Amino acid sequence: DAKTTQPPSMDCAEGRAANLPCNHSTISGNEYVYWYRQIHSQGPQYIIHGLKNNETNEMASLIITEDRKSSTLILPHATLRDTAVYYCIVVLIQGAQKLVFGQGTRLTINP
Amino acid sequence: KAGVTQTPRYLIKTRGQQVTLSCSPISGHRSVSWYQQTPGQGLQFLFEYFSETQRNKGNFPGRFSGRQFSNSRSEMNVSTLELGDSALYLCASSLDRGITNEQFFGPGTRLTVL
């Protein structure tokens, strides 16, 4: 079973920041938080991951709370192409390329 | 660098038949994972291969099997197909140098069982 909880859907206006929350209250010290997204009919796409520090890359920022029980993915300037299902996944740091997907958040960017 | 490729992209089979799907990972990637996606169950992990050995396995019946070749290419096989096996089958590859890395997914093979 997935170890994360996400809202089933969210809306965001184009050009605004999209903030997607995720709860992972049972995360352990040897687990990362990973984010992927899946645009309709395509394979999932890696976005970002982190352990305990905030992370930023060209796609997004990841804010992890100090107790690591929740995180927020931030798309700073959402575009229509960011409409997708976003998955927050907890993954072992070593030796396990196994992603347990939950239902994710369906993010709709509105013009 | 070429991405993950999967063949065929679409497949139609009838109940009781078997099917083999193929996945070519990104060059240099040694880990290949397979996932099944259905509207009802979402994305589910099938198995993962690393250096020609199955390293992780999901909760699927023995009708689902796979293998990996020395060049890291992988195949999955489903025997005695059932209607419920209709799904999008996704393959993903990763570098895996001892720690978990991001997985790169292929476009998938859409299997329809009639």
Image (cartoon, rainbow, N blue to C red):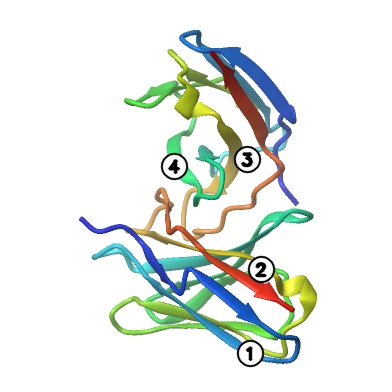
Residue under circle 2? B58
Cα distance between the residues tagged 1 and 3: 40 Å
Tell me the element at label 1: loop
The amino acid type found where label 3 is placed reads: Ser
Q: Are marks 2 and 3 on the same chain?
A: no
Nearer the observer, A58 or B110: B110
Count numbered badges in the picture: 4
Q: Is residue B54 above or below residue B89?
A: below
Q: Earlier in the sequence, mark 2 or mark 1?
A: 1
Identify the subunit bearing mark 3: A
Circle 3: is it few (<14), some (14-19), or many (20+) Cα within 10 Å? Answer: few
Q: Are marks 1 and 3 on the same chain?
A: no
Residue assigned mark 4: A46
Residue B55 coordinates in the image, percent (x, y): 52, 73
Seen at 57% across and 39% down, the residue is A29
Tell if the residue under mark 4 belongs to the same chain as the one under mark 1: no
Instruction: Please tell me whether residue A63 is drawn above or below residue A102 in the rendered image.
Output: above
The three-letter amino acid code for the residue at tag 1 is Gln
Alpha carbon separation for disc pair 2 and 1 = 20 Å
Q: Could one spot residue A5 in this view of the protein?
A: yes
Q: Where residue B30 sits: x, y (%)?
A: 34, 68
Instruction: Say which element carries label 2.
Output: loop
> Against A13, is B16 above or below?
below
Disc 2 from disc 4: Cα separation: 21 Å
Please name the residue shown 67% across and 32% down the image.
A105
A103 left or right, relative to B68: right
Chain-order first, disc 3 or disc 4: 3
Q: CA distance from mark 4 to mark 1?
A: 32 Å
Image quadrant holding the N terminus of chain B, namely bottom left
Q: Nearer the viewer, mark 3 or mark 4?
A: 4
Position in image of residue B26 (x %, y %) = 29, 62
Query: For mark 1, what is the residue?
Result: B18
